[in-house]
Structures are given as C-alpha cells and as structure tokens.
Image (spheres, grey):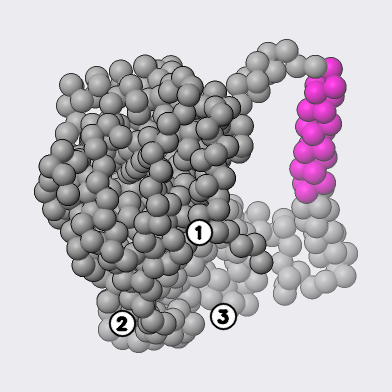
Amino acid sequence: MGNNSIVSMDNVSMTYHQREGETHALRNISFDVKEGEFIGIVGPSGCGKTTILSLIAGLIKPTSGTVYVEGKPVEGPSSKVGYMLQQDHLFEWRTILQNVLLGLEIQGKVNEESKAKAEELLERYGLGEFKNHYPHQLSGGMRQRAALIRTLAINPKILLLDEPFSALDYQTRLAVSVEVADIIKKEKKTALLVTHDISEAIAMSDRVFVLTKRPATIKSSHKIELTCDANDPISCRQAPEFRKYFDIIWKELDVHVQ
Amino acid sequence: MFNNKASKKTVSKEHEQYLKRIRRRNISIRFTQIVILIAFLALWEIAANMKWIDPFITSQPSRVIDTLISLNSEGVLWKHISITILETVTGFVLGTLIGTLIAIGLWWSEFAAKVVDPYLVILNSLPKVALGPVIIVWIGAGTASIITMALFVSVIITIITVLNGFLEVDPDKIKLLKTFGATKVQVFSKVVFPASIPTIISALKINVGMSWVGVIVGEFLVSKAGLGYLIVYGGQVFRLDLVMTSVFILVIAAAIMYHIVAWLEKRYSRFYLSK
C-alpha cells in the first residue's frame, strides 16, 4: 500500500451473518486510490459494491483486513468522507439550506463561516435562489445537486457515490452526471462511484474496477484514457476508445439474463 | 412546478370553466348534505307532532331546543359541557403524550420493544372499558377515574401507531445521518421524530374518538356530572329529551375537536404529502 494513497483496502473480506446463514460479500479486496482520482466500481447486481463504500465510510467493520483513509485505519464515520446515496433523501420538512446544513449540524460545526460556505456552494452551483424553497419545489436534477452540496458542505476529502443517479430518468441522469463530475473536479475531491451503468463509469472515472459475483473480488482494473474534453462526460461518450472499454468491461461482467 | 405559477396569472377560458364546474359541484354536494339534515329533522318533528311516533320515547327537535334552553336557564348546561370537554381534552393530551413517550422508549430499546410486543397486542384487543370498575375502585369515583379511563382507551393504540411510524422511517435516511457520524439521539431528533409527525397526527385523530368513548363510559359509571351523566340520568328517569339533547351536544363537541385535529394535520402535512 503506497503512502501517497488517500484510500486503500488491504486484503479486506466481509461476511454478513443472518439467521438463514452467512453471506460472503467481499473476499480479499485490495486497492489504492490516489488523491484526486475518480474511481468507478462496476459489478453484477448484489455483488457487494455498496459494502465497499460502507466500509470506507466506517458504517461497518470488515471481517478481516484493514481499510485505510489517509493512511489511518478507519474506526468509524468521519468528516473526511462524504457519502451520497441512491436517493437524494432531502428532508421534506427542511428548506434546501437547512438540508444542506444537516451534516454540519450533526457534527456541531454550524457557524457563520461554515454557513456562509454552504450558501456560497448553493450559489455557485445554481441553487442560490432556491435556498429557502422546500425540496418538493425542486426538480429531480436540482434535488440531486442539493444532495451533493449537502455532502460537500462538511468539506470531505473523499466522496462515496452509491449509484447516485439511479433514481433519475435517463435524460436527467446524463445531465446530472455531467454536473456532478464537474463539481467534483472543481472541488478537487477524490471520488469512488458505484454504478451498474458501464457507460457512466467509463465516462466519469479515471479508473474502473470490475468486481466478480459474490463473494466479490476485483476481477480487473482499467485505466480509462479517452481522447476528449475531460470536463464534458457527454462528449467523452463519443470518444473512439469508449466502445472498446465498454466491450471489454461488458464481457468481464459476464451478464446472463435468465 | 414553476409553469403552474405562471399559468395562475393567465388562466385560459377552458380552465376557468373547469374551475367553475368544480366549484358548482362542490356547492351542490354541500347543498345536498344540508338538505338531508333538514329533511331528517323536519320529518322527525312532523312525525312526532302527528303522533306517528311517540315523542315520549323518541323526543323531537323542538323538545331538544326547549331542553337546551331550560338547562341553560338553570345554569347547569355549561357546567356539564365543560366538565366533559375538560375530561376529554385532558385524557386525549395525556394519552397522546404518554403513548408517544413510551413509543420513544421502545424505539430506543429494540429489546424492550420485542419483550412488550405480545402484551401490547393483547392489551390492544382488550376492550379497555371492561377495566372501568377496577379503575373506579382504585382511583375513586371522580374526575380522575374518568380521565384515567380516557387515557387507558387511547394510550395503547397510540404506542402501537407511533412506534410503527418510527420503525417505518426509511433506513437510508438513517444511514445518511450515520455517515455524518450522528448519535442515536441525533438520529431520533433529526429524522425519526420529524419524519413521523404525520403518523403522530393520524394517531391524534384516532385518539379524539377514543377519548370520547373513554370519558362517556367513565361518566356512565361514575355518574356525577357531565354529558355522559346526563345521558344515563335521562335514561333512568325516562327523560329522553335530556338524552337526545346530550347526544346532540356531544355530536357537536366531538365534531369541533375532530376538525381542530384535521386542521393541524392539514397545516403540517403540506411538506409530507408532496413526496
């Protein structure tokens, strides 16, 4: 494990226990992520992709092996790591600004400065005039953006994105993924994106990990180099290499529809 | 969403007609409702006057009004009404508060919730009014017994409804808070409780009816004052006018209380309904 890696997993295995038996979710997973990298993680559904993110977020502890964030073993949730879930989960009874301040509130860090920064983020990403609106007054794309700003407000170094666009319709999904990739690059965050959308992973990531079926291991890792404007994931989808990566990853996923 | 706002200013002719149609329909519904009420009261009055029915047993609207006036001039009308309402409101508030507090405790400790579960189910299916005589023996024949009765009737169902509300909160919302490092108290105060407010309000709606049942049965048993007392007393001395008058007041008081809760629900549900 390199010292310059911001997130790393060292031989991590994870087993869930239920009355019906035990589920081996992950087996001997090891990887390093460098600061500022955007990692895409794809794999068959139910293979334990979310488990990887939950481990990094400190929500669960691995059965064996160690997870490191900034070189230190993960003990529990920390403000270095921000987590974005499948749905925006904006609270209907809070305004957008109050929603965005949620993380700071929980960490007891709401003050003039942090509040100003949150408002500035809303302003910068086009939600300034909606800060006193309630979530139901916003479109799906805007809601997802607000959810991202809520995650950014605690100023994490690492962002974990757990299929954050899966609840959106296809067009909104494309637009929001462009926005989110753009925001994450501008804010210079390290990101790990779990998705079942191969195109999304290729378009947004610097590297893509392909997982096997349960118990998941890393089957392969692809460094993505597309000849396109890196700030525009839509144009990147038209890059000549895109198809090649797509075909390789598709074959590796070995999807069978029954 | 924002188109709606714009279209409000420039309403098209079709839309105007559509709105008019809806308004007319609502008015005719309300009109029919009032007509049914008036027709019922008129038929009752006429039937009693024509001796189709015996007003000694059935009473009649004019006698109800006379009874109201005489009770009022004797100065006892408000005494009975206020006693019953006070008992009901107290029982209702206590039942809701205590039930919610117990539900919070059971949410906090899953172990405790599992342990008391069968007891709650059995207590819920038990007709609480059966405990009336026991309560009177323990607490004494008075207001305290009646309030306890109302409390008993509403508290179990409150615990069950509110606890279910707490447990139905989206686990991903809780996960979100945990990623921020939230403590259990924060999970409760920031998401579980606010997300359950609609459930708590619907528990309130059930409790209004429950509290009336508890109080009236309590007054039947204790029989000192209140609308329940007037009903029992009227029945015993065969003054059906008094019984009908009390029932009439009861209907109005219960309707007002229900509407207060419904208004509360409307106020708070605007954030929740939209999802």
Q: Quadrant of the C terminus of chain A?
A: bottom right
At label 3, the amino acid type is Gln
At label 1, the amino acid type is Ser
Mark 3 vs mark 1: in front: 1
The image shows residue A151 at horizontal and vertical percentages of 32, 36
Residue identified by numbered label 2: B115
Q: Give the mark nearer the N terminus: 3 vs 2.
A: 2
Relative to A58, B274 lies left or right: right
Quadrant for residue A171, please give it. top right
Disc 3 and disc 2 on one polypeptide chain: yes
Depth order, front residue of B133/A118 = A118
Inspect the magenta stretch and tell me whether residue A168 lies in it.
Answer: no
Residue identified by numbered label 1: A45
Q: Which residues are magenta?
A: B13-34
Q: Chain of mark 1?
A: A
At label 2, the amino acid type is Val
